[in-house]
Amino acid sequence: MAKLIYSAIASLDGYTEDGDGKFDWAAPDEQVHAFVNDLERPIGTYLYGRRMYETMAVWETMAGQSPATRDYAEIWQAAAKVVYSTTLETASSARTRLERSFDPGAVRGLKAASERDLSIGGPTLAAAAIAAGLVDELHLFLNPIVVGGGKPALPDGTRVALELMGERRFDSGVVYVRYSTRGAP
C-alpha cells in the first residue's frame, strides 16, 4: 500500500502563508530544492485543493532557471494530479483530474491501489486528510522566520501522535523534519 505524505514549507511559528497571504519568504534555495526533489521523485500522484493546484500548475510549462527547478518541473509533470474543487471548471495541466469533493474512502482506495506514494498539498486539504487518519507521514520544512499569523500548516483541533523519522538542517537555516503517524505512542 502506498503512503500519503503531507509536505509543507512553513514559518517557524507554523504558517504556510503570512497574514497577508504572502509566502515569498518560503522560496527554497538550490540546496533545499534539490533535497525536496529527491523526496518528491517517488511520488506518483499529487492531491491538491484548488488554490494549491493553481499555485503549483506553473510547473506544467516552466522549464526552470536552475538545475534543481528544471528537475522539479520534470518530476511534477510526470506525476498524476487530483484536484478537489467545486469551482474549477477545467484543469490546466496534463495528467490531471477534477473531483468535486474530498472523499476519504476514495483516497483510501487510491492508496491501496497505488504502487507509488501519494502527496497531499495545501494545509486545508491536508487538514481533512489528517482528521480522517489518511496521512502516513508529515514532511515539514521550517523556515527561519516568524510571520506572526496567517494560514496554519497544521490543523487546529486534531490530535495525532507522531514519531520522528528524520531531520536535516540546511545552510540557509531551514530545518526539515519527517514524522510518521503510524506506530507512534
Image: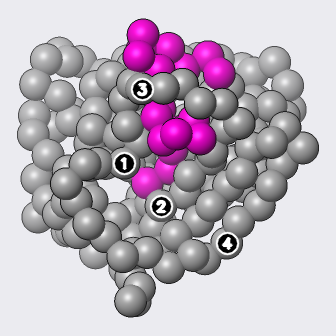
Instruction: Check disc 3: other Cα within 10 Å, few if <14, some if 14-19, many if 20+.
Output: some
Q: Residue at x 22, y 59 (%)?
A: 158
Q: Which residues are magenta?
A: 6-25
Q: Above or below — where is 131 with respect to 111? A: above
Q: Give the number of the disc on residue 149.
A: 3
For the residues labelled 3 and 2, say whether their Cβ atoms are less than 8 Å apart.
Answer: no
Q: Secondary structure at mark 3?
A: loop
Task: Give x and y (percent) for residue 40.
Answer: 61, 52
N-terminal label among 3 and 2: 2
State the separation of the CA atoms marked 1 and 2.
10 Å
Would residue 165 be found to the left or right of residue 90 on screen? right
N-terminal label among 4 and 3: 3
Q: Residue 144: within the magenta?
A: no
What residue did someone put label 1 on? 154
Q: Give the number of the disc on residue 166.
A: 4
State the separation of the CA atoms marked 4 and 3.
27 Å
Please state which amino acid type lies under the numbered disc 1.
Answer: Leu
Q: Above or below — where is 118 with respect to 147? A: below
Q: Residue 10: within the magenta?
A: yes
Q: Residue at x 28, y 48 (%)?
A: 155
Q: Secondary structure at mark 2?
A: strand
Task: Give x and y (percent) for residue 39.
Answer: 65, 57
Please state which amino acid type lies under the numbered disc 2.
Answer: Leu
Q: Give the number of the disc on residue 138.
A: 2
Using the rendered image of the protein, determine whether residue 104 is visible from the camera's viewpoint. yes
Instruction: Check disc 1: other Cα within 10 Å, few if <14, some if 14-19, many if 20+.
Output: many
For the residues labelled 1 and 2, say whether their Cβ atoms are less than 8 Å apart.
Answer: yes
Q: Residue furthest right?
A: 171
Q: Above or below — where is 179 with respect to 66? A: below
Q: Quadrant of residue 23?
A: top right
